[in-house]
Image (spheres, rainbow, N blue to C red):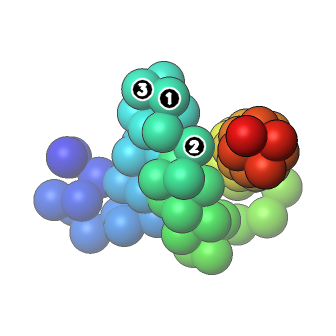
Amino acid sequence: MIYGQEGDESRAALATAERNNLEGDPKMALASAETAMRGIPVGTPDYLRAQDIAMVSRTALKKDKKGRDRE
């Protein structure tokens, strides 16, 4: 909330991605991580964390899709 109030939308998106990741919502985590990466300088710790969340979320979504395709 603080990042959003201070106008740092990218870091607010990263915090949202973190929350969605912890809550097991890979679709929302991916969307928020991608938003964060658009506004955070490449190579910074925050960018790398957003990148990690995006990678984990994509993997979870692919795994979920494969599971549904088998049903």
Q: Quadrant of residue 70?
A: top right
Which residue position is annotated with label 1? 24
- Measured along the vertical axis of the image, is residue 45 above or below residue 33? above
Can residue 15 be seen here?
yes
Q: Quadrant of the C terminus?
A: top right
The secondary element bearing badge 3 is classed as: loop
Percent position (x, y) of residue 46?
64, 46
- Measured along the vertical axis of the image, is residue 25 above or below residue 35? above
Check disc 2 and give the amino acid type: Pro
The secondary element bearing badge 2 is classed as: helix
Contact between marks 2 and 1 (CB within 8 A): the answer is: yes
Percent position (x, y) of residue 25?
48, 39
Q: Residues within 10 Å of mark 1 (few under 14, many from 20)?
A: few
Q: Residues within 10 Å of mark 3 (few under 14, many from 20)?
A: few
The CA span between labels 2 and 1 is: 6 Å
Residue at left 24%, top 59%?
4
Which residue position is annotated with label 2? 26
The CA span between labels 2 and 3 is: 9 Å
Contact between marks 2 and 3 (CB within 8 A): the answer is: no
Which residue position is annotated with label 3? 23
- As drawn, the residue found furthest toward the top would be 22
- Measured along the vertical axis of the image, is residue 28 above or below residue 23? below
Check disc 1 and give the amino acid type: Gly
Percent position (x, y) of residue 26?
57, 43
Residue at left 42%, top 26%?
23
- In the picture, measured across the screen, residue 12 lies left or right of residue 47, that is left
Check disc 3 and give the amino acid type: Glu
- In the picture, measured across the screen, residue 33 lies left or right of residue 20, that is right
- In the picture, measured across the screen, residue 41 lies left or right of residue 22, that is right
